[in-house]
Image: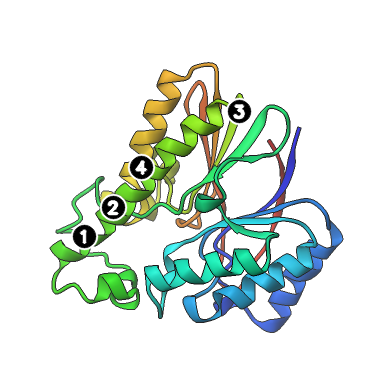
Amino acid sequence: MPQLRWASDLHLDHASPAAVERLHADLRQSATIPLLVTGDISTAPRLSADLIALADAAAAPLWFVLGNHDHYHGSVGGVRDAVIALATARPNIQWLPPAGVVPLDATTALIGVDGWADGRHGDPLTTPLVLNDDKLIAEIATQPDRLTKLAVKRALADADAGRLRILLERAAAMATTILVATHVPPLVEALPASGRLSRVEWHPLLVSGATGSVLRHFASHHPRHQVHVLAGHSHAARDVQLLPNLRCRVAAARYGAPHVQQITI
């Protein structure tokens, strides 16, 4: 069975040099095992440099999806251009959507999309909670009100859901186990069952309804395929079996304490 190192919500811009060095040391100890990062690596101005440092420490292929924080102090378009250029210069560092279907072994394939919280759960227009996306990501910040900001987020989420639909079908033709990397949990069930983050006012900010719909539809129509989703964003560890063949794991995370774990698919 394939092994991976998985990290999420590293937020390296919030980590001290000593904490970053501890992360790099952990990666060097298990060199050659591929590294998967499910978003919120750092922020737009430093993202490429942080990815290069991670890949150098890992000494193995690095696959990643982007989180909302990775666009802070920049733009969606600018960050995407930068990571596509990075993949050309450093082929061992690949943003997953354009990387397509990545075979991990004879029966397992990896795909990924970023995913965006799209306000399709809860009420996005009345929740008192707001993320910094609204003022730190150019395409969203330039919108004049909450409704038009939501429209941008939904357009981004829907585009990723469309990519995911295509990638799932391609992966299904190659493998019976499909690992899906995404940043935003795709289903409400992947949030904590109790506590602060279980409250409905958080749902518009923590769930990508568009990707969740695609995953449920695919799994229900492909009962012979196993779909394993790895996500982040909420910082709250969760492992939930949504359907007999659809499992979602969300990584725990804490600002200032980036870490990596080893998993077997």
Quarter of the figure with residue 75:
bottom left
Measured along the vertical axis of the image, is residue 72 above or below residue 92? below
Residue 144, above or below 36: below
Secondary element at tag 3: loop
Q: CA distance from mark 2 to mark 3?
A: 30 Å
Name which of mark 3 and mark 4 comes first in the sequence: 4
Residue at the front extreme of this rendering: 88
Q: Earlier in the sequence, mark 1 or mark 3?
A: 1
Residue at 15% in and 64% down? 148
Find residue 180 and report its horizontal and vertical position in percent.
53, 41
Do residues under tags 1 and 3 come within 8 Å of each other at their CB atoms? no
- 177 or 23, which lies in front? 177
**Amino acid type assigned to the residue bearing label 2 in the image:** Asp
Q: Which residue is mark 4?
A: 162
Q: Which residue is rendered at x = 49% and y = 49% of the image? A: 182
Callout 3: 10 Å neighbours few (<14), some, many (20+)? some
Residue 199 position in % (x across, y down) = 31, 50
**Label 1 neighbourhood size at 10 Å, few (<14), some (14-19), many (20+)?**
many
The amino acid type of the residue labelled 3 equals Met
Whichever of callouts 1 and 4 sits on the residue coming sooner in the sequence is 1
